[in-house]
Image (tube, rainbow, N blue to C red):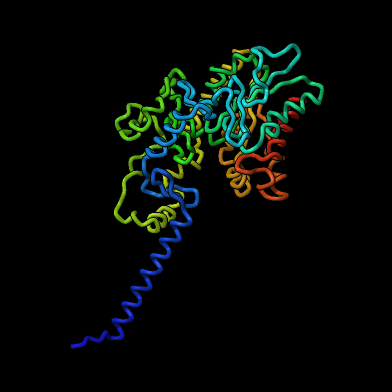
Amino acid sequence: MKTTLKPIHLKILLSLGTLVFFFAAAEVAVRVMGGTDASGNFYFKNRIIHPHKMPLKMVAERTRALQDSDDSIVVYHEVLGWAPRPDSESANGMYRYNSQGVRSPVPAFSDLPAEGVFRIALFGDSFTHSDDVPYEHSFGAVLERSLNEAGIPAEVLNFGVGGYGIDQAMLRFEQQGAAFAPHLVVFGFQPENLKRNLNLMRPLYDPRSGLPFAKPRFILTDQGISLINVPVLPPDRMVDTLRRFDDWELRPHEYFYDPADFQASWWQGSKLLATIVDLKNGQESQWLLKRIIFQEKSEEQNLGWAVIQAFNQEVAAAGARFMIVHLPTNKEMELHAGLGRWTYQTFLDALDNEYDVVHPEAALIRAASESGYGEIFDGHYNRKGNRIIAEAIFSTLAE
């Protein structure tokens, strides 16, 4: 006997089919719009979607690549975590480091500055290093030319390193910079560095960074600050430590690890559902909050302040002057445009009260208001952005 579907049944089937079709299409669209890293973490709109996966594959691959390479531009350092490889050059030729690991075309600097030469040493992260521009357009190089053209014999040594926190910048001065007897030490304050001070495993802070290293970290004590994870965990122990991270004795000091981030539910097999839930939570996401919100009277600000104080004291003990230059990111400038203040304004005000701080932000904002942020940023500061930073430091020194 032949069975004929009733119209109502046909409508239900058609509706279900349409629903399945649109769900599948949306699932495909989200996966195409997002991206998955080597370890299986899915990203959407620059945000890692739950559940997270330990970046074991990325760390293993990057560690193996570095171990097999004799010309990489970054190497493990037992105190700093990582540092530029002396006498190295990036594949694209943009970054070159001399025999002392300083970004410079000068093969090597003398231990002491020449008579009558004003020596400046720069410390900080990738913004100080001047990522994304050739050396001659970095703000250190532009500053050096400006001083010499003004009749002030000067040389600028760039000790900036991508991914560094304030802690690593200070330790690089101790380990390497102080020996060059600079007259002036300029610390590039990129506000995100406050958060990096709370990090021990760089891949947990940002699995996309490609830096498979651990780092040193200071902790606050009744006596001030105390350094942990030195010697820094070597690369060949990274994968095993991450795999058993809950058992690592230093795990309580890793601010950017939350076991809940790695717990999966069956429905999160759908990137569409997982993304919808994460975006719906918005700024309630602790993973996101830890990276974008600057909390006053928090460990990040208290520790950051203590490390900068120690940095200043180290510089003074070496007989040099300490100066800070404010280096806001593209994201921070966008937030400033909407809020009318920096999200870390209180901390910046405190720095102003205590230290010599160079403020290039007014010139940066003016330039961005004319043609957009692309006028001064191309990932990091572009040539124009670097020139603005150099001009601000030069003007401060001239005054």
Q: Is residue 367 visible?
A: yes
Residue 386 place in picture, x, y as percent: 68, 36
Q: Residue at x 54, y 29 (%)?
A: 73
Q: Residue at x 33, y 40 (%)?
A: 259
Q: Residue at x 74, y 28 (%)?
A: 394
Name the one closer to the observer, 373 or 26.
Answer: 26
In the visual, does 379 lie left or right of 205? Answer: right
Find residue 397 and report its image quarter. Answer: top right
Relative height, residue 130 to residue 110 (above, below): below
Name the one closer to the observer, 226 or 296.
Answer: 226
Q: Is residue 186 visible?
A: no
Relative height, residue 79 to residue 262 (above, below): above
Relative height, residue 230 to residue 19 (above, below): above
Quadrant placement of the C terminus: top right
Residue 245 place in picture, x, y as percent: 33, 33
Residue 45 place in picture, x, y as percent: 49, 52
Residue 379 place in picture, x, y as percent: 60, 42
Relative height, residue 189 to residue 315 (above, below): below
